[in-house]
Each structure stands twice: as C-alpha cells, then as structure tokens.
Image (tube, coloured by chain):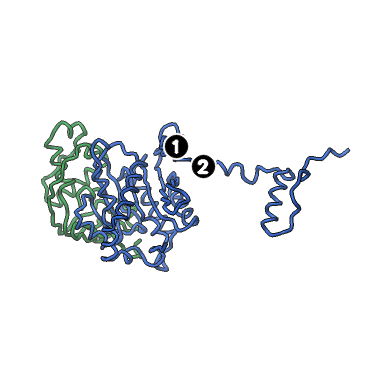
Amino acid sequence: MSRPEDTLSADIHYDDTEARKYTTSSRIQNIQASMTHRALELLDLPGPSLILDVGCGSGLSGEILSSIPPEEGGPHAWIGMDVSASMLDIALQRDVEGDLMLADIGQGVPFRAGTFDAAVSISAIQWLCNAESSEDSPTARLSRFFGGLYASLKRGGRAVCQFYPKNDDQKKMITGAAVKAGFGAGLLEDDPETKNVKVYLVLTVGGGAIEGSGGDITGVVRGMEGVDVLDARRNQKSGKGEIKKGSKAWIMKKKDQMERKGKVVKATSKYTGRKRRTAW
Amino acid sequence: MKILSLNFLTCAVKACKSSSDSYPLHPKDAELVQDEIEVNAQLLVNLLPRLDWTALSTTATELGFPALPPQPPSAEDLQADDKTLRDLHNLLMETQIMEGKLVCGNCGHEYAVREGIANFLLPSHLV
C-alpha cells in the first residue's frame, strides 16, 4: 500500500481534489467513524466535554463527537486543528459544529494549560514523522506536539491517537516521544497481525488511570472485552542480568547466538550443560 | 472562531510561551456573527471552572459587549438562573468571529481569521 506521508507534506498532499476524494469516499467515512467510536470508548468521558481533535481534516471525526446523544454523555464541544486549508474548506461546506483552526501540530499546540478534557486524533500523527525542510526534524516536531498536547490537557485527561505506523521503528519513535513529554502511554492494537490492524496510542495525564490500577495505563482498557494486556515492562525484569553465567540457560543462549551468527554449533543433547560432580 | 476557543488560545510563538502578555489574544477589526446553537447546560457547568474570567471580560469589552459581572457565576447560579446561563451561552458558543485578526499582546504577531478559521501557521523562525 502506498503511503502518502512518504511523498508529500500533509498541506500539499490534501489539495482540493484529494480532500474531496477523501471526504466523499464511503469506505473512508466508515473506517473513520468506527475508529472515532473506538477512541471515544477508550476516552470513557463521563459527560459533555471539550475535546481537541488533532488533524480534524474535513470534520469526519468531529461530526461524531457532536452527535453523541445526551444519554451517552454527549454532545461534546470540540476544537479541530488541521494543516490542510482544503480539508478545512470542505469542513466549512459541510457545516460542522466544532471550531476550526489552521495550524501545524508539529509546531505545537497553542492552548493554555489545562484547556481540554480529552483529545482525539484519527489517522494524523504519522504525518509528524516526516519533516520537509532541512531546518526541521521529526523528533523536534514530535516533541513540540506531545509537549504542547500534554500541557493543554487537564490533569486526569486522556488522549487517544489512532495512527498508521510505517514500521516498528516509527511506532517506537512516536511512543517514545509521548513518554518523554510526560504521558503515561500504551498501544492498543485492534485486529493485530492482519492487514486491517489499527493502532491506538492511549495517553494519560497524571491520574488518568482508574482507581486501583496503580496509575497504570492498563487501567484504561480494564473491563473491556477481548483485550489482552501485553506488558513489555514485565519482560524486562527477566532480561540479561537474570541468567547466571555458566548455567544451562546461559549455555543455551550462547549456543543460540553462535548459531544465529552462522557458526558451527554442536547439537544439543541430554549432556549439554549438565551438572558435574563437585571436584574431589 | 468561537469566543470560547479564544478564551483558551495563546500566542503560538516560542518566545511568547513565558510571557503573561501573550494571553489573551486581542481581537482586531473583528466581524461577529451570531449562530443559533442549542444550550448545553452540563457542558457550560463543566467548562466554568476552566474559564479565565478576567480574560473573558477583557475580550467581551474589546468586542463591544456589555461589561461582565466582576466575579464569575458559580455552578449553582448557572443551574438556578436561566438568564445567566443563556447570556453565557450566547457569548461563549453562539458568538463567532468570522473575519478579523487576533493580535498577541507580547510580540504583536497577527493571526488572521478568515471565514471563521484562525490561521495559526507560523514561519519556521518563530517556532
């Protein structure tokens, strides 16, 4: 699949024709709607809130925020930021209810501290990984964005950013930038290991997690159906330092390493790394 | 651009982050439009503690609205008094700046507002 992020910047890629195509495609509309609903489910807002829509585009996701019925905690007020003027133009024609701003999220989030209850971003932040000019870098753009977002959310607020990472490196880069800005971060993957995988970066500010989960991001998805929690931090403990030098596990690890290097390694048998009698 | 958003926006220029003059932004040559929007009392009660009342009073005076009371209404006031609620709703939600400029009090940068959309794109040397 081609990635528009690789060729052009967002404001140039989404010109009038591209923006219209994007907004009128029923396939994109459906995907965007389902992702926005999923993001709202993760935000778990108790009542009508002020939400920042990062990369709001033509307002496909914002429309859903304004249309949540009162019994489900809506309707929410939202402020949308986007870098493409053509997209915003279509949003104007569609008469969306939120407030729109022409702004580059890579330049920061110009709101005062504690403005928003929550933030959503649907298919936008992967654009941050591409810097078009030599005086700008993806890392700087990411850190300005997450720094600004962190400040503009109220304590206990949450942000859910759905994005399309190009590879694992990009996933790591984005998550790392969010953690560096102070967020509690976790990745939720819907339909993992399929072509339709959807990656949601779930961010919490301060005490955003539910009581009893120890301020942990996993509290956000607690109680949700069909969610497996894979905690990468737990694995780190049983990392390097744990294996005792000379033990059977250590020998197996070394043999493995050598094999991967392409060296000739003796076959493993029942005698490999066996315990010897103490020397007399 | 709603007055509600204006109450939260600061100057985006990096050098202005530390200055107190960069908030609130001052509207200039603003053309206002009133839109009918349904009153959402719960939302206003939720937003009330986050509003900067001094900044809101400044903005309201600059836009030619009658002066606001010196103290913000409490949540109970809003729920009890329909008129206060309606006035606040009218100012925050229904009033929109369609054309004009927003000026930073510190660096003097002007953000253009066209068709209700504020342009916060900055040249790279200001980021």
Count of numbered badges drawn on the protein: 2
Q: Of helix, strand and loop, which one carries label 2?
A: loop
Q: Is residue A230 above or below residue A29?
A: above
Q: Amino acid at mark 2?
A: Asp
The residue at the point 15 percent across, 49 percent down is B95
> Looking at the colours in the rendered structure, which chain would you say is drawn in green?
B
State the image coordinates of residue A77 (x, y, percent, origin top left).
24, 45
Which residue is labeled 1 in the image? A215
Q: Residues within 10 Å of mark 1 (few under 14, many from 20)?
A: some
State the image coordinates of residue B7 (x, y, percent, origin top left).
23, 48
Which chain's residue wears label 1? Answer: A
Tell me the mark number nearer the camera, choosing from 2 and 1.
Answer: 2
> Looking at the colours in the rendered structure, which chain would you say is drawn in blue?
A
Which residue is labeled 2 in the image? A231
Q: Of helix, strand and loop, which one carries label 1?
A: loop
Which chain's residue wears label 2? Answer: A
Q: Is residue A71 above or below residue A250?
A: above
Task: Please state which of residues A95 and A117 is positioned toward the viewer in this rendering.
Answer: A95
Q: Which mark is residue A145?
A: none
Task: Please state which of residues A15 and A197 is positioned toward the viewer in this rendering.
Answer: A197
